[in-house]
Amino acid sequence: MSTIISLSHIGMEFPSLDGTGSVEALNDVSIDFLENEFVVALGASGCGKTTLLNVIAGFLRPTSGEILHKGAPVTGPGHDRGVVFQKHALFPWMNVVENTEFGLKLQKVGKEERRDAARANLGLVGLTDFENYPIYQLSGGMQQRVGLARALTCNPEMLLMDEPLGALDAFTRETMQELILNVWRQTQKVVFFITHSVEEALFMATRLIVMSPRPGRITHEYKLEFYRRFFESGDARAVKSSPEFIKMREEVLSIIYGEEVGEQMP
C-alpha cells in the first residue's frame, strides 16, 4: 500500500502560561499513514493526541520534524485532509444540506454539482430525508452524521476525527461506530481517529497507536482485525465480548494506567 501522509520526527512545543519557558506536547513522533488504513490514537488526557491531529490537519506548524503528503511538504490545511470535530461545528443558520455542501461552496463549485455531492454523502450517512431540516432539530448523533457527510463531500484522501463520538450516549455511540466503519469500507479513505475509549479503539482500528503522557510519543503499536470480524458477522457486541477482545482490552488498559501512574510518581 502506498503512503498518503508521512510524519518524521515531529516535535511540538507551546509557550508556557507564565511566559518564561515552553511546554513540550510532542516528542519525536514518526508515523506513516497508508491508503485505506483506519488508525486510532489512544492515550491518557494530555498525551498530545489532538495536537498531533492538528499538526496533520495543518492547523499547527510543528516545532521540529517534517510532514509530507505523497512526498510534498504539508504547510497548512488542504482539501486532501477533512476534519470531523468532537463538537460538530455546524452552522445553526444553515440547514442540513447547506452545511454539508459548505466546503465545496468555499471552493466555488457550482450549486448543482455541490448539491449533488452533498446529497450523495447524506445518503451515505443515512440522512437522505433530512436535508432541509434545521440543525437544531437534529439529535446529537444526527448532527455528528452531518459533520461526517460535510467532511466527505470535499472528497479528501484522509479523514481526521477528533473524538467525534465522545459526547454521545452509549447506544448512539455504538451505532455511530458501526456507521463510521461501514462508511470507511465504502469510501476507502485513510482515517486517523482519536478516542479515550479503549473498547472503541480496539473495535474500529486496523492499526492502534498508544501514546505516552506529555510529551506525547508513540510507545506501542498494534495491528488489529476486530473490525473485520464485525464486517463478517454484523454483530458488534459479539466481537466486543469475545475472549480475544477482552484480553487485548485489558492489555492496553494496563499500558495506559501504568503510564499514568508512572507520570505521577516523584
Image (cartoon, helix red, strand yellow):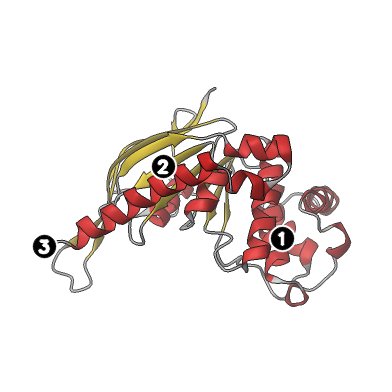
Q: Mark 3 vs mark 1: which is more N-terminal?
A: 1
Task: Identify which amino acid the numbered label 3 is placed on.
Answer: Pro
Q: Which label sits in the foreground, 3 or 1?
A: 3
Q: Nearer the viewer, residue 21 or 202?
A: 202
Tag 2 and tag 3, C-beta contact below 8 Å: no
Q: Position of residue 77 (x, y in %)?
A: 50, 49
Q: Give the Cα separation between the discs numbered 3 and 1.
A: 46 Å
Check the image and name the residue furthest to the left. 266
SS under mark 3: loop
Q: Is residue 208 above or below residue 101?
A: above
Q: Mark 2 vs mark 3: which is more N-terminal?
A: 2
SS under mark 2: strand
Residue depicted at x 23% and y 72%: 17
Task: Identify which amino acid the numbered label 1 is placed on.
Answer: Val
Q: Position of residue 102 (x, y in %)?
A: 70, 59
Q: Is any atom of residue 25 visible in this view? A: no
Q: Quadrant of the N terminus?
A: top right
Q: Position of residue 90 (x, y in %)?
A: 65, 67
Q: Quadrant of residue 262?
A: bottom left
Q: Give the Cα separation between the discs numbered 2 and 1.
A: 27 Å
Residue at mark 2 = 209
Q: Which mark is residue 73?
A: none
Q: Nearer the viewer, residue 113 or 53?
A: 53
Q: Quadrant of the C terminus?
A: bottom left
Residue at mark 1 = 146
Residue at mark 3 = 266
Tag 2 and tag 1, C-beta contact below 8 Å: no
Q: Give the Cα separation between the discs numbered 2 and 3.
A: 27 Å
Residue depicted at x 60% and y 67%: 89
Q: Is residue 199 left or right of residue 68?
A: right
Q: Which label sits in the foreground, 2 or 1?
A: 2
